[in-house]
Image: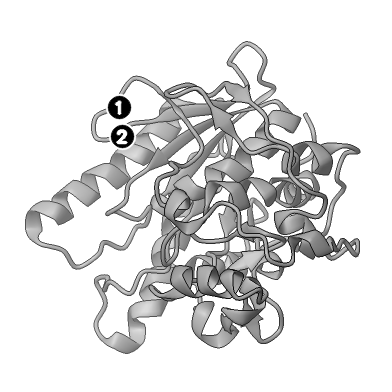
Amino acid sequence: MRAHGAGWLPMGVLAVAVAWAPALAPGHGRRAATVRLPRCFGAASRDPRTSCHNPRLRYTVRPRPSMAQLTPNEPCERLEPWGPVHPCAFGAAPEDAVTTIALIGDSHASHWRAALRVAADVRRWRGISITNGICPVSAVPRRLPPAQRRQCDEWNETVLRWLRAHPEVTVVVHAQLISRKDVEASSARTQFAAKVSGYRRVWRAFPPTVRHIVAMRDNPKVLPETPECVMRARARRLRPGVTCALPRDWSLRHDPLAAAAHQTRSRRVDLVDLTHFFCGPRVCYPVVGGALVHKDEHHLTRMFSTSLGPYLLRRLNHLIPAD
């Protein structure tokens, strides 16, 4: 696996990406309105290259937890179904795109779409989102009832056929929830290793037209009571992100997808790890730069995901040269 360096960030991208909240027309990928956000908002407050601090964000929480739960992920235009695979499109229009990428995985892939949309807009990428909340993209199946297992097997096989039938897709971004659900393995001790093997094997099955596979290290989680803690801290004029922070060792679990990327020697597999924007050395923060990080126990808010866009772009610029 190639190491991911910092890469470069085009001038103005940070300002553009964190200066608006993605208010879009329902059912469309076009931006309908813009909302100006403060300096150093969201992930910008933890950019390791700059010291960005805005005291006005000390007690800010955007969006409120009650609103975050109602806000869907970045919109995606539905495309023609491919059997059990239901792709949708985001980013550049087909006639404007210089590259086509696929975002695959479960609901955690879906919440990364807002960040990836920022990169797609800058790089003129057309993104195709292919996700399934039950079945991971893996060569090792979960232990499921027979009917569900057959459905997952069929879904995974169809994803591979879809990739083979779309040679224009040269980049795959793969993201998965760190699930505690068992996979087919001989013992509990081998569960993690089996999951790692499943990801490595499915990547080897990707067609050679996929030149870059980007594994996204999964994000930390919070407690069910974290949203209440955040709003209580804000009401008491305490810093919500610090007051309600959680131990890093608990919040950030060992990720088999990231381990698979580390163990893979193929030069087309890379890992993107944005943990620094969520966590310090000892704790992980539920509010970062005034942005609420999670909309539930483990899914990112669309607003915070969008604020991560310039930093995901920075990594991708290093890993994937411009065409």
| Depicted 68 relative to depicted 172: above or below | below
Residue at left 24%, top 65%? 142
Q: Amino acid at mark 1?
A: Trp
Q: Which residue is mark 2?
A: 85
Residue sitting at the far top = 95
| Depicted 96 relative to depicted 2: above or below | above
Q: Amino acid at mark 2?
A: Val
Residue 153 in the image, given as x and y percentages of width and height: 23, 50
Specify the quadrant of the image occupied by residue 116.
top right
Residue at left 70%, top 56%? 42
Residue sitting at the far front = 236
Q: Is residue 308 left or right of residue 7?
A: left
Residue 214 in the image, given as x and y percentages of width and height: 60, 51
Residue at left 57%, top 21%? 30
Quadrant location of the C terminus in the rendered image: top right
Quadrant location of the N terminus in the rendered image: bottom right
Q: Nearer the viewer, residue 93 or 19?
A: 19
Residue 21 in the image, given as x and y percentages of width and height: 64, 39
| Residue 192 can be seen, yes or no | yes
Marks 1 and 2, how far apart at CA: 5 Å
Q: Give the SS element for disc 1.
A: loop
Specify the quadrant of the image occupied by residue 240.
bottom right
Q: Which residue is mark 1?
A: 82
| Depicted 117 relative to depicted 109: above or below | above
Are the residues at dot 1 and dot 2 in contact (C-beta closer than 8 Å)?
yes
Residue at left 39%, top 21%? 79
Q: Which mark is residue 21?
A: none
